[in-house]
């Protein structure tokens, strides 16, 4: 069955992480001298399959062939020997060593043999870098290099080790548009040298700009592999988000939405690295409605949630909540005004893993009269209150003092919701609230959100899971490049329309008209 | 493909490294283990004793006899016990000071300087307000030492919060500033004119000295130290502020989400941390030396760091570890009669810290059979 046209083939790859099936019988093949894009949403299984190619993970089952010969890749070292090099999203460089030292590091034949030897190595590296148009100051320590330069160091590292297959995991997520263009020109050069480049991405524009062939993955499965010539962004967007609408059960509200609770007007927010994360964003959330924010990750979701909760400042625009304008970014003001927040990563910013249940429940209410007096915590009252919440929200915990990191993900999330809902918030900002939860826990979280809505509270649901957004939201806003590019009501919501907005195509069309 | 490393691979992250095929057992970091078991501290101390025994034996002495002598010297006679407690007082106060900072991951290693700042400030009272009655001079000295130590702590906290200057560097460097300032005053303006050029201030009057127990040197500073322990324990457990500190220590990112202003807490904590070390400086000059003099601290501020780590920042553990280390210092003196230098206690201190840190590290590893 083996065909000579493919230099690398992965057949029927399955990868399980405990109960989670990350890759479900995936087939993937590359031709020599092509740029092959692996397209899919976050969590589609792109990185997992690439990690198996580079020896970071081992497949549960399936086979990998290189030039027609079956190979076992047990470690990154094995991968290097087979000519596979991977550039990870977060670089694996030693900050205090020079770029050249980083490249030489870990190579078997590279015990340091004096300054003369290092100088020759550096020249060798500079020659490779020059050849591929990947210039960087090889003699400088990594910490002095820009992110783009560091990425070039990583790429040259794979080339220096003689990689034939170069895997770039979300390469442009850290680059400025200019740097990205430069990277794509380099890919052309690498292609001309007969190298095979595989890049994983969820950005359609990049795929169309750089790739020769495109494989689309969704929910752990390989959907389709196409030639760039035979496809377009629209088709790819459809493939990426999928079409199955049938399974979505929609919760409808039992009364019409009330007055405007949250009114965000023309907001500009700058994120990390001075990048404009929210660009003239406006949105409204009314009482008694769930507004879903859909969008591909990295289009401003994180910043939107943070700015509403007072965690980061804004440059321009207004945030009016419950009829009052926020003067400046203050978490305390947001809490006291009645905004609840279920953050994206519960263990990173929502809970303190080493503290017990009571301490975690006190997070936002410990300043209130009921929880403390004259600076002293009401220890006994707080325990009773915690016990009530644990029972009310059905949190399974070994005890009130058990460190919450011992709880299961679903129970941690219940605990977080218990805390945020008990405060009787006027607005709930929930970010990826069901990430990593099993079906039962997911349903529980959904019920909590719809209950809040039915009580007349406002809910802003920011999620990458389109099914979730479509199932719960009364209105869906689509976030693209830091702005709201489209709004669909519950009735007219379908995956295709939303997918086009998410890819930034629909808006472009409107502007053209 | 066939060659393999000769030893078990040591993965940096779980799951990222391959399992060597031929080896049945391999070493892994278990991410779920954040704390080492309680007996690790005792094991570390025993290993440190064993380790130092080699050096004692190399000096031609019987390690067992030396340790016995150290123990009896520090813990069996009335003189030994009170002397041990005298050394434990500054260790406990400085140890509390650094513990409260370490609780929120502010790495204050400047207790030595804050101790000196407190001692200087307390002595300033005796220099500029002489002849006060004891009920005025002692409280004033306490107040001055707290303010002096607190200012020294703030000097570390402010650059950290406003300019992201690493506190390890500033607090360490400020130690030298404070110690040189101390040298300046005792060699210069405050030098006892009748002291035959001895680098020290005039002796304190009785009204400027802390009361002592009987005819021992054990002074009232012990009450300060124990009161501070209780206050620290109570604050951390029962107050809003203590809760905020626990939260910052457990997860600063989450604390931010709870609306806690971390910068402000860092400043306050560093002031408190410095104030406690400053109080230790006051109790030392007023309770033990009765004057400010050159070389007032044999490194209490540094030893306190070890004391705090051994106690795992637990207030009551601090009492135990500071007495242990006080005993180590006193025991070090008592082995001098055997012809060993007293710096043997420094060696033991260092070894204990080394094994403790190594033990905490090893506790995270787990041996696993390769299937």
Image (spheres, rainbow, N blue to C red):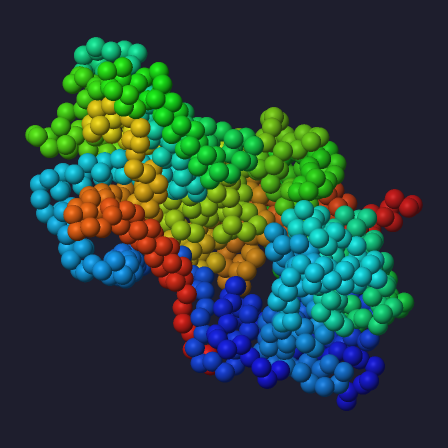
In this picture, is B170 found above or below A41?
above
Residue at image position (61%, 52%) is A95
Residue at image position (28%, 47%) is B343
Residue B104 appearing in the image: no
Q: Position of A403 compared to A253: left or right?
A: left
Residue A283: which quarter of the image?
Answer: top right
In this picture, is A106 found above or below A335?
below
Residue with the most extreme front position: B196
Residue A254: x %, y % from top left: 59, 47
Residue A374: which quarter of the image?
Answer: top left
Residue A140: x %, y % from top left: 69, 50
Residue at image position (59%, 84%) is B2
In this picture, is B304 found above or below A410?
above
Residue B130: which quarter of the image?
Answer: top left
Residue A6: x %, y % from top left: 80, 80
Residue B220 appearing in the image: yes
Residue with the most extreme bottom position: A1
Comparing B193 with A46, the one in front is B193
Screen quadrant of the C terminus of chain A: top right
Residue at image position (58%, 82%) is B3
Q: Position of B100 compared to B46: left or right?
A: right
Comparing B246 with A129, the one in front is A129
Screen quadrant of the N terminus of chain A: bottom right
Q: How many marks?
A: 0
Q: Position of B129 compared to B85: left or right?
A: right
Residue A310: x %, y % from top left: 57, 35
């Amino acid at each position: 069955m083996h065909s000579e046209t493919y230099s690398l083939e992965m057949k029927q790859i399955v990868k399980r992480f405990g109960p989670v099936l990350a890759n479900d019988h995936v087939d993937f093949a590359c031709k020599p001298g092509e740029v092959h894009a692996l397209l899919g949403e976050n969590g589609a299984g792109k990185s997992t399959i690439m990690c198996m190619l580079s020896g970071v993970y081992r497949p549960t089952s399936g086979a990998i062939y290189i030039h027609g010969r079956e190979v076992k890749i047990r470690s990154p070292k094995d991968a290097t020997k087979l000519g596979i090099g991977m550039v990870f999203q977060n670089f694996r460089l030693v900050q205090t060593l020079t770029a050249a030292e980083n490249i030489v590091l870990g190579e078997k034949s590279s015990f340091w043999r004096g300054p003369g030897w290092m100088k020759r190595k550096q020249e060798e590296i500079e020659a490779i870098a020059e050849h591929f148009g990947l210039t960087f100051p090889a003699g400088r320590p990594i910490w002095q290099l820009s992110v783009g330069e560091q990425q070039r160091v990583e790429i040259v590292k794979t080339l220096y080790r003689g990689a034939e297959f170069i895997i770039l995991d979300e390469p442009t997520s850290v680059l400025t548009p200019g740097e990205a263009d430069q990277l794509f020109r380099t890919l052309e050069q690498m292609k001309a040298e007969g190298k095979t480049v595989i890049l994983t991405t969820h950005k359609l524009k990049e795929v169309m700009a750089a790739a020769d062939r495109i494989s689309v993955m969704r929910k752990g499965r390989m959907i389709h592999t196409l030639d760039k010539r035979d496809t377009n962004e629209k088709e790819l967007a459809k493939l990426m988000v999928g079409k199955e609408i049938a399974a979505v059960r929609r919760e409808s509200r039992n009364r019409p939405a009330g007055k405007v609770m949250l009114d965000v007007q023309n907001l500009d927010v700058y994120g990390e690295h001075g990048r404009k994360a929210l660009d003239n964003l406006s949105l409204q959330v009314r009482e008694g409605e769930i507004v879903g924010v859909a969008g591909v990750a990295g289009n401003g979701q994180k910043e939107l949630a943070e700015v509403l909760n007072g965690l980061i400042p804004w440059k321009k625009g207004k945030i009016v909540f419950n009829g009052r304008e926020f003067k400046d970014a203050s978490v305390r003001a947001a809490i006291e005004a009645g905004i609840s927040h279920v953050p994206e990563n519960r263990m990173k910013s929502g809970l303190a893993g080493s503290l017990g249940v009571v301490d975690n429940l006190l997070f936002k209410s410990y300043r209130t009269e009921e929880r403390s007096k004259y600076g002293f915590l009401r220890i006994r009252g707080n325990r009773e209150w915690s016990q009530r919440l644990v029972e009310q929200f059905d949190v399974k915990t070994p005890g009130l003092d058990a460190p919450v990191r011992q709880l299961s993900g679903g129970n941690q999330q219940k605990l977080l919701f218990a805390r945020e809902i008990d405060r009787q918030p006027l607005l709930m900002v929930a970010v990826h609230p069901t990430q990593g939860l099993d079906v039962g826990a997911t349903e529980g979280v959904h019920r909590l959100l719809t209950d809040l809505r039915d009580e007349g509270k406002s809910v802003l649901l920011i999620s990458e899971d389109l099914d979730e957004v479509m199932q719960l939201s009364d209105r869906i806003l689509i976030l693209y490049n830091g702005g709201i590019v489209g709004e669909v009501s519950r009735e007219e919501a379908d995956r295709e329309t939303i997918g086009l907005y998410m890819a930034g195509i629909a808006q472009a069309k409107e502007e053209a008209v | 493909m066939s060659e393999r490393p000769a030893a078990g691979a040591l993965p940096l992250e779980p799951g990222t490294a391959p399992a060597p095929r031929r080896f049945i057992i391999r070493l892994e970091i278990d991410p779920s283990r954040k704390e080492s078991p309680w007996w690790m501290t005792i094991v570390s101390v025993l290993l440190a004793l064993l380790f130092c025994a080699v050096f004692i034996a190399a000096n031609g002495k019987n390690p067992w006899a030396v340790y016995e002598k150290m123990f009896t010297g520090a813990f069996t006679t009335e003189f030994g016990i009170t002397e041990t407690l005298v050394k434990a007082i500054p260790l406990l106060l400085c140890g509390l000071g650094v513990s409260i900072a370490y609780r929120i991951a502010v790495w204050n290693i400047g207790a030595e300087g804050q101790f000196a700042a407190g001692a200087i400030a307390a002595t300033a009272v005796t220099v500029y307000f002489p002849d006060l009655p004891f009920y005025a001079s002692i409280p004033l000295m306490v107040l001055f030492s707290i303010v002096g130590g607190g200012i020294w702590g703030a000097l570390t906290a402010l650059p950290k919060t406003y300019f992201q200057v690493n506190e390890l560097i500033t607090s360490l460097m400020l130690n030298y500033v404070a110690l040189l300032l101390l040298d300046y005053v005792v060699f210069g303006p405050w030098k006892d004119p009748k002291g035959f050029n001895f680098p020290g201030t005039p002796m304190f009057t009785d009204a400027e000295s802390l009361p002592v127990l009987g005819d021992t040197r054990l002074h009232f500073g012990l009450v300060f130290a124990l009161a501070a322990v209780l206050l620290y324990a109570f604050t951390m457990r029962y107050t809003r502020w203590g809760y905020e500190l626990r939260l910052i220590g457990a997860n600063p990112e989450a604390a931010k989400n709870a609306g806690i202003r971390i910068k402000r807490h860092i400043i306050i904590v560093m002031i408190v941390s410095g104030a406690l070390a400053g109080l230790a400086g006051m109790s030392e000059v007023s309770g033990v030396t009765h004057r400010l003099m050159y070389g007032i601290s044999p490194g209490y501020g540094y030893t306190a760091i070890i004391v705090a780590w051994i106690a795992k920042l637990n207030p009551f553990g601090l009492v135990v570890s500071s007495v242990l280390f006080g005993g180590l210092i006193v025991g070090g003196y008592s082995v001098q009669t055997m012809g060993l230098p007293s710096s043997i206690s420094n060696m033991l201190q260092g070894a204990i810290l080394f094994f403790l840190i190594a033990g905490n590290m090893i506790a995270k590893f787990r041996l696993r059979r390769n299937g």
